[in-house]
Amino acid sequence: MKLYVPDSNRLNLLGHFLVKIISTNCEKYKDKQIPSSASFLIIGSNMKVLLAVKNDTFEITESNNEKVDLSIKAELKTFLDIALGKNIILPFLSGKIKLKGNPTKILPLIKWLKV
């Protein structure tokens, strides 16, 4: 399990937030394999980050409008609440999280996005 960040100096706050969470989980789940391959555009409070998952590697980069499997949009506070273990279903049901694309791609990765 690896985390690859080509240029951390170009990441916004959302990107650094994801790097910290995923790097912590790479240590925690170091013997586990990532169950899927996909790319996600994560949009929080007008910040965009591309999260690509492939060959047991998470790659976090700035977004340049690439084609992705799923776009996830929410306020930064909503992402923080989920990362800290709050219920993930309520934000979906209340419309705080908006998805565009194939939502089944993110399900196997939920535990990697929590601290």
Image: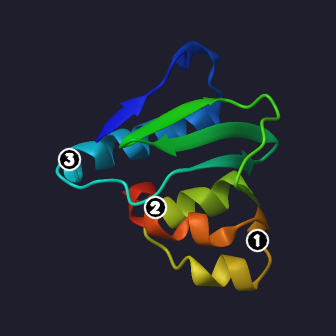
| Residue on which the image places disc 1 | 96
Q: Secondary structure at mark 3?
A: loop
Q: Which residue is mark 2?
A: 109
Q: Earlier in the sequence, mark 2 or mark 1?
A: 1
x, y percent for residue 74:
74, 59
Task: Work out whether residue 55 or residue 65 is closer to the camera in this orientation and state it.
Answer: 55
Label 3 sits on residue: 30
Q: Position of residue 66 (x, y in %)?
A: 78, 36
Tell me: 86 left or right of 112.
right
Up the image or down, 111 lies above or below 19; here it is below
Which label sits in the foreground, 1 or 3? 3
Where residue 11 appears, x then y in whole percent?
62, 24
Q: CA distance from mark 2 to mark 1?
A: 19 Å
Q: Amino acid at mark 2?
A: Leu
Q: Are marks 1 and 3 in contact (CB under 8 Å)?
A: no
Residue 55 vs residue 70, the one in the foreground: 55
Residue at 80 percent across and 77 percent down: it is 95
Of labels 1 and 3, earlier in sequence is 3
Camera-side mark, 2 or 1: 2
Q: CA distance from mark 1 to mark 3?
A: 31 Å
Q: Residue at x 32, y 35 (%)?
A: 2
| Label 3 – label 2 distance at C-alpha | 14 Å
Q: Which mark is residue 61?
A: none
Side of 70 where 60 appears, left or right: left
Q: At which x and y percent is residue 44? A: 73, 49
Which quadrant: the C terminus?
bottom left
